Each structure stands twice: as C-alpha cells, then as structure tokens.
Amino acid sequence: MINFQRLLRLTIHVSLGAFVFFTTPSPALTSETCPVSRITELLENGGYIVTHNGQIIEQCNSDQHYIPASTIKTVSALIAFTILQPTYRFQTDFFYQNKVLTIKGFGDPFLTSEEVLVIGRNLRARGITEISELVLDQSTYQVVEPPDGTENSRNPYDTKNGALAVNFNSIPVIVSDNGVIESAEPQTPLLPIMREIGLQLDPGINRVNVFAYPSTKPVDNGLRYVAELFIALLDQVGIKVSPQYRQGHVQSGATPIYSHFNALNLEEVVTACLKYSNNFIANQILLQTGLELFSPPASWPKVHQTIATVLTNQFSINLGKNEIYEGSGISRRTRVSPRFLIEILEHFKPFAYTMNKRGDIHIKSGTMKEVYSYVGYFTDGVSYDPFVILLNQETNNRDTILSLLAERYKAHLERLNHNLRSRQP
C-alpha cells in the first residue's frame, strides 16, 4: 500500500497528434484580446483557458509564458506514463560475493523503510546471514547537482535526486525539550545520522533534507542514510552486518542474488506524487524516463532531451518558447503558456484519476511566492475538459477564478443543451 501518511507528513513539513485548435489561436478570441469580465479584472499578471470537447470556451493571455510551479508535474507524469507505462515498477539489484553486499540503485523514489525491511527478509531467505561490508552503487545516475531552483534548505522539497535514496532523502526526528532524540516513525529505527542531525534541530517533530547538513563520513549524507538504514533493518531480520560501507561499483564476478521490484507501480507512484506534490518523486520518475529512453546514466541533460523528444515525437507538441528545467516545478526559470498546458492535459485525460478531486473537479495546484496555479478537468458527466489558470502575481485569486471558470463552463453546457432541445421536433 502507498504510505500516504508519510507523504502527508512530508508535505506538511514542506508546507502534445496535436489538436490544431490549441496550437492556433482562434480568430474570434486571441490571447491578446481578453474578454472584459470579472475574471480578467482579477488578473494582475496571468492567463487562463477553459475548454469543452476540445474547443476553447474562454481564454486570456493563453500564449504568454508564466512560472507554473507544481502544475508542471503533469508534464512529468505524462512523459513517464508514455515511456515507462503505468505498470512499471522501480528496481534495486543486490549482489553478494565474499560476504560483501553490493546494492545497485535504479532510481526507486519509494525505497522506504518498509521496502528495505522486505528486502532484508528476501535476502535472509536466500541464505545471507552475514555481511562484512556494504557497497553502494549509484552509477546509473549522474546527477551530482541538485534540481534547478533548489536552495539546499532543511525543507525536504529541496533535496537532491539520485540512483540510490531512502525515505525521500528526508529524516524523521523528534527532539524533546530536554534534548532527547528519537525517530519520528516506528518503522524507521533511530540511526547515527539522525542523532547527529538531531543535535542541530529545535525541539519538536522534524523532517529534514539530509543534504542540508555537512557530511562527516567518506560518503555523502544520502548514501550514509541508505547504508545505516540497511544495516539496522538487516539486523532486525537476523543478518549480521558490519558497520562498514563505501560507495563503489558492482565487482566483476559478483553474484546477482536478488532484484527487488517496489510494491508500488508507476500509476500508484504518480498518484502519490500528485496528491502530495512531492518534488523528489517527480524528478526521480523523469530522470528514470530519460535513463530508459537514452540509456544510463540518468542526467539532467537527458531529462531536457527526454521532454523535448517525447512531446514532439509522441504528441506533436513543440516546446517552442516554453522552457522546462526540471520535473517538479521548483525552478522559477521554468516558463510555460496556458495553451501548452492545455495540450498536455488533453493527452493526460486517461490519467485524470491520478489527480486530487475537489468535488467533481480533478485538480493539481502549484504554489510558490507570487505564483498561484491550477490545472485540471471539469466534467460534463461524460468527458473530461481541461482548464488552466497560471498567475504570477502578488494576489492569490486562483480560487475565485476557478469558481468563475466553473460557472462559465456550466453556462456553456446549459447553452448547448438548450440549443439541442430547440432543434428537436
């Protein structure tokens, strides 16, 4: 099952065969001739589109480019579904030789404590009882630099990506008023890295980015977290593990002993990603898509190449002046138009169910400082009709605009029904 509670806690702590009518502005209503309405009065710097059956009902500034924030996750999800397929499961491989266990990562974004415990049981069932050293192989990813737009803060949304990561690269720590440090999760034991970082935290429940703190070991904090979690949980299942670990590669002749496929498929991973707007997951799935499309190692240049290639070849959507720097929306350099996102949403219709629901509306929000966005679908009871709201302004009017667009949509349906009835004999 998806660990929704963990993602919820994580979120709380971080607080296109194209459709011609979308790529060519309607002569009757171009993006430069916004209708005079209550909606446009609310626009300081923004644009919107609402559609029905592939036709634009109303639009304003639909070809202008704005920071989309987390609404760009729909692009990442569409690309991943197209290349990896919804049933795809992330993999982690294990090799054993002379009591040395090598863990080779392939970008699993949901390698949680629960999954590591399952791995331990499977290794024990395969006869492993003693490990003298852990070797951590993350050679399938070449992403030393963090996603564009991150600031290396304590917030989990600022963490790095990589081939081998546990618990979303965030540690859960409770610090009591008298300085006692405990794990904030029953499934995650208190680890040395948690004690060390906990000494730098204020009292209370903390969930922090492991990379925000200086490394005190030969490996970075991400790999240290992986090693210490595996050591602790393998011990729980009866495997004696030496506290020795290092970064390295699978050695020639090492015996492949186990390939672990995550309990969650891509459909479930994307649902969790959109539900909790998890930046780490969004970039992991896009990096993995680039790896599958262009071979290892995964890298940010391959992410950019993947976005352009898939959108052009699979959906006939040209990026043009739209710029996407990473897959989560954290980059303020990412700029897209409402029209571009409408095209994305047209192709994302089969996966609308992975979005959050607000009443009958499927919706994905995007929020940053002076960035307030919504994308999603209204429905006439039969089909899904995309809408986009992108605001780059001080005033957050997106909920009011959404309500007004819903009224426009409903009025449009009523007119269509009236016209249909009037033509009946």
Image (cartoon, helix red, strand yellow):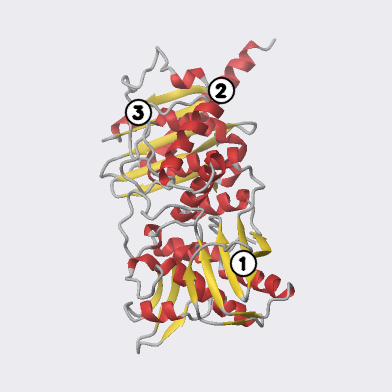
**Residue 149 visible in image:** yes
Q: Secondary structure at mark 2?
A: loop
| Mark 2 surroundings within 10 Å by alpha-carbon count, few (fewer than 14), some (14 through 19), many (20 or more) | few
Q: Nearer the viewer, residue 217 or 28?
A: 217
The residue at 38%/45% (across/down) is 69
Which residue position holds label 3?
Answer: 321
Counting from the top left corner in percent of width and height, residue 176 is at: 39, 85
| Mark 1 surroundings within 10 Å by alpha-carbon count, few (fewer than 14), some (14 through 19), many (20 or more) | some
Q: Secondary structure at mark 1?
A: helix
Q: Amino acid at mark 3?
A: Lys
Which quarter of the figure has residue 30?
top left
Q: Nearer the viewer, residue 398 or 74?
A: 74
Q: Amino acid at mark 1?
A: Glu
Q: Nearer the viewer, residue 291 or 356?
A: 291
Counting from the top left corner in percent of width and height, residue 47 is at: 35, 31
Q: Nearer the viewer, residue 162 or 367?
A: 162
User: What is the spatial separation of the Cα atoms under label 3 and label 2, in whole angstroms?
Assistant: 19 Å
The residue at 66%/59% (across/down) is 263
Q: Tell whether 361 sits left or right of 171.
A: right
Which residue position holds label 2?
Answer: 17
Which residue position holds label 1?
Answer: 115
Q: Amino acid at mark 2?
A: Gly
User: What is the spatial separation of the Cα atoms under label 3 and label 1, in whole angstroms?
Assistant: 42 Å
